[in-house]
């Protein structure tokens, strides 16, 4: 059966607000001095209230016109409880009158997010999310962070090997910054010094996984790598069953430990994560009437790896590697019972950064992953490689920043080019303009969005 929207969590407004009305509201916001509205008198004496109001317009370079017209309000409140506990709360209220990235209130989050981590939808075009909510405390020499949070492992830019603690939201594929794409999780995070190093323990009882766009969204997946393809000549129906999402406390929780330190000029870490993969394998099942049912399933896996980095003059060398014991991939071989195979996967990233001067940095990365075994009809090669190059430069006393990021997958010959220029109009207002351009055909991870090339214009105001 097809997944139905989670109706009881959807809030319907009495009236619809036009895009023009929200544009007027945005201009009004930007004309107000933040201090006149958000003063410290609104919060307790020991609290700090700040945040960001921003808007981003995306123009599709195809005939589809606008991709989005986001207006986001992100408040952040910090306050102290006594002398030893600090609480941080970060929210995000978003409105998009275009409604093409997540058409209607997306029903998929009921399958991907736990109840305590879901967003609240206001009609079809607005949503609110408690992004982070945690308390920090020192217990002797140890540090404890308890609550909803992000944990960053590894040092790779744009590509993930070790940075898999938090799942991702693919509302805009991989175009936004990682900080905006990660889905914060409720967890206990403890760090303590040990023998000149630092040990970190994670307990994650939040059973939330990657959130992918529904069919009909601009960035809905279609690549053969991640979406099962109907056999040639198939005339039946394709049905979608709810994902079998793990939800048992303790038994289905994720657990992680990391040892990190600094030795001989090297920053290093050793990492271990016992977790469910955040992307369920879309296993197929041929029904008696000839129809195909897709039933996503999650698989337990062990991740073991580490990272290291060191600076040599103007150069910085970065390395990151990890081995997953159970990764799931698709196969088109009709003799395979469910069209999915599990295999071990070794992946690594080598990065080299060059700091030309105080204003210019160049960075190159090579990402490769190798599968332990590949059956007939596998949707990807045994060895897969992606190359990235980043150039960033600042001008006019750091008020203007220009950057270009290029990602290229060697196997499929597809890629992504991101260009962005930002200008600090005032101390708290930033203007941005850029472009996201996809290269390749629909079979590749990047090429599947070849018709989604866009121009981006944004404005951001802090308070």
Image (cartoon, rainbow, N blue to C red):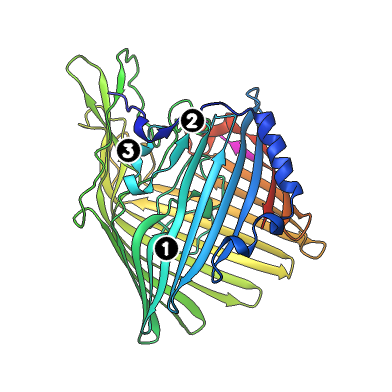
Q: Position of residue 238 (x, y in %)?
A: 31, 21
Q: Which mark is residue 123?
A: 2
**Magenta residues, start to end:** 436-441
Question: Residue 112 sits in which quadrant?
Answer: top left
* Magenta stretch: includes residue 275: no
Q: From this view, report whether residue 85 is shown above or below residue 403.
A: below
Is 121 placed left or right of 49 in the picture? Answer: left
Disc with the residue nearer the chain's start (2 vs 3) = 3
- Name above or below for residue 384 compared with residue 306: above
Helix, strand or loop for disc 1: strand
* Local crowd size for mark 1, using a 10 Å CA cut-off: few (<14), some (14–19), many (≥20): some
Q: Earlier in the sequence, mark 1 or mark 2?
A: 2
Residue 300 left/right relative to 266: left
Disc 3: CA contacts within 10 A as few (<14), some (14-19) or many (>=20): some
| Residue 32 visible, this angle | yes
Under circle 3, the secondary element is helix
Question: Could you tell me if the residues under marks 3 and 1 are in contact, i.e. CB atoms within 8 Å?
Answer: no
Task: Locate residue 349, reporting x and y percent.
Answer: 47, 60
Give the quarter of the image for residue 376. Answer: top left
Q: Nearer the viewer, residue 243 or 333?
A: 243
Q: Foreground mark, 2 or 3? A: 2
Q: Position of residue 204 (x, y in %)?
A: 31, 59
Query: Alpha carbon of mark 1 to alpha carbon of mark 2: how far?
Result: 29 Å
Distance between the alpha carbons at the discs numbered 2 and 3: 20 Å
Q: What residue do we see at 70% from left, 59% from top? A: 35
The answer to which of marks 3 and 1 sits earlier in the sequence is 3
- Residue beneath disc 3: 111
* Residue underneath mark 1: 134
Q: Is residue 178 visible?
A: no
Name the residue at the bottom extreme: 195
**Circle 2 Cα neighbour tier, 10 Å, few/some/many (<14 / 14–19 / ≥20):** some
Which SS type dominates the magenta stretch?
strand
């Amino acid at each position: 059966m097809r997944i139905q929207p989670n109706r009881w969590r959807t809030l319907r407004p009495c009236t619809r607000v036009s895009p023009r009305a929200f544009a007027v509201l945005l201009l009004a916001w930007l004309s107000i001095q933040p201090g006149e509205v958000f003063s410290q008198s609104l919060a307790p004496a020991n609290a700090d209230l700040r945040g960001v109001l921003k808007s981003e317009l995306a123009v599709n370079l195809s005939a589809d016109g606008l991709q989005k017209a986001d207006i986001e309000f992100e408040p952040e409140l910090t306050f102290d409880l006594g002398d030893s506990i600090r609480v941080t709360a970060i929210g995000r209220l978003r409105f998009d009158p275009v409604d093409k990235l997540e058409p209607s209130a997306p029903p998929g989050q009921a399958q991907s997010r736990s109840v305590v981590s879901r967003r609240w939808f206001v009609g079809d075009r607005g949503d609110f999310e408690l992004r982070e909510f945690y308390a920090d405390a020192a217990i002797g020499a140890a540090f404890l962070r308890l609550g909803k949070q992000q944990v960053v492992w590894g040092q790779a830019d744009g590509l993930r090997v070790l940075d898999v603690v938090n799942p991702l939201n693919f509302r805009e594929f991989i175009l936004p910054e990682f900080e905006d794409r990660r889905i914060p999780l409720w967890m206990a995070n403890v760090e303590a010094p040990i023998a000149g190093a630092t040990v970190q323990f994670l307990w994650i009882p939040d059973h939330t996984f990657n959130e992918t766009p529904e069919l009909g969204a601009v960035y809905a997946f279609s690549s053969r790598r991640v979406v099962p393809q109907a056999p040639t000549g198939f005339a039946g129906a394709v049905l979608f069953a709810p994902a079998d999402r793990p939800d048992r406390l303790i038994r289905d929780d994720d657990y992680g430990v990391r040892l990190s330190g600094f030795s001989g000029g090297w920053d290093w870490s050793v990492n271990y994560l016992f977790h469910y993969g955040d992307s369920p394998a879309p296993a197929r099942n041929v029904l008696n009437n000839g129809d195909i049912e897709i039933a996503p399933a999650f698989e337990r896996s062990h991740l073991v790896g580490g990272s290291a980095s060191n600076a040599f003059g103007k150069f910085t060398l970065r390395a990151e590697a990890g081995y997953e014991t159970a990764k799931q991939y698709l196969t088109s071989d009709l003799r395979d019972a469910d069209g999915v195979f599990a295999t071990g996967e070794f992946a690594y990233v080598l990065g080299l950064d060059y700091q030309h001067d105080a204003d210019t940095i160049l960075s190159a990365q090579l990402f490769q992953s190798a599968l332990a075994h590949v059956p007939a009809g596998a949707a990807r090669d045994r060895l897969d490689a992606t190359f990235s190059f980043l150039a960033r430069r600042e001008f006019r006393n750091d008020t203007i920043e220009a950057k270009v990021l290029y990602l290229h997958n060697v196997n499929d010959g597809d890629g992504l080019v991101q260009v962005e220029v930002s200008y600090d109009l005032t101390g708290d207002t930033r203007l941005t303009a850029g472009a996201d351009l996809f290269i390749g055909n629909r079979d590749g991870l990047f090429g599947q969005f070849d018709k989604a090339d866009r121009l981006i214009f944004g404005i951001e105001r802090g308070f």
